[in-house]
Amino acid sequence: MATATTKAKASERIKMRIRKGDTVQVIAGKDKGKTGAVLRTMPNENRVVVEGVNMRTRHEKPTQEGETGRIVTEEASLHASNVMLYSTAKKVASRVEIVVEKDGTKKRRLKKTGEVLD
């Protein structure tokens, strides 16, 4: 039986530095070392869904008469602390820092490579 994830209260919510479309590397768990793009972020649960990582199989019953059942494989969510942003140019995972530019805009930058993400 699966355990339910509890939602964080607004006061307890951790601001996620990972966004949809980022390339991340899994740093813990059975898929450690795999990389992929972030398909979805769930800030209330502090979880992310990564393409091709943490695959789960699910059995679907036929919904209409004459249709056959099928087995569907899909990505399950990972805790955000188990992934780290990944630089595709340097092939290295790194922590991220928030840098405030002179015009006041905030940018995300990888600490190891200095690569600016947005």
Image: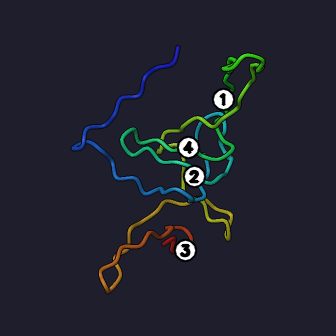
Q: Position of residue 66 (x, y in %)?
A: 78, 17
- Badge 1 crowding class, 10 Å Cα cut-off, few under 14, some 14 to 19, many 20 or more, is few
For label 3, the residue is 115
Task: State which tag comes first along the sequence, 2 or 3.
Answer: 2
Q: Is residue 58 above or below residue 100?
A: above
Give yes or no for contact between labels 4 and 2 (Cβ–Cβ under 8 Å). yes
Local secondary structure at mark 3: loop
Q: Is residue 85 above or below residue 99?
A: above
Q: Secondary structure at mark 4?
A: strand
| Mark with earlier residue (1, 2) | 2
Q: Which mark is residue 56?
A: 1
Q: Which amino acid lies under the numbered mark 3 shown in the image of this protein?
A: Glu
Circles 4 and 1: CB distance less than 8 Å?
A: no
Residue drawn at x 52%, y 48% as measured from the top left? 40
* Separation of residues labelled 3 and 1 (CA atoms): 33 Å
- The label number, if any, that marks residue 80 in the structure image: none
Secondary structure beneath disc 1?
A: strand
Q: Amino acid at mark 2?
A: Val
Of mark 4 and mark 1, the one earlier in the sequence is 4
Q: Label 2, on which residue?
A: 38
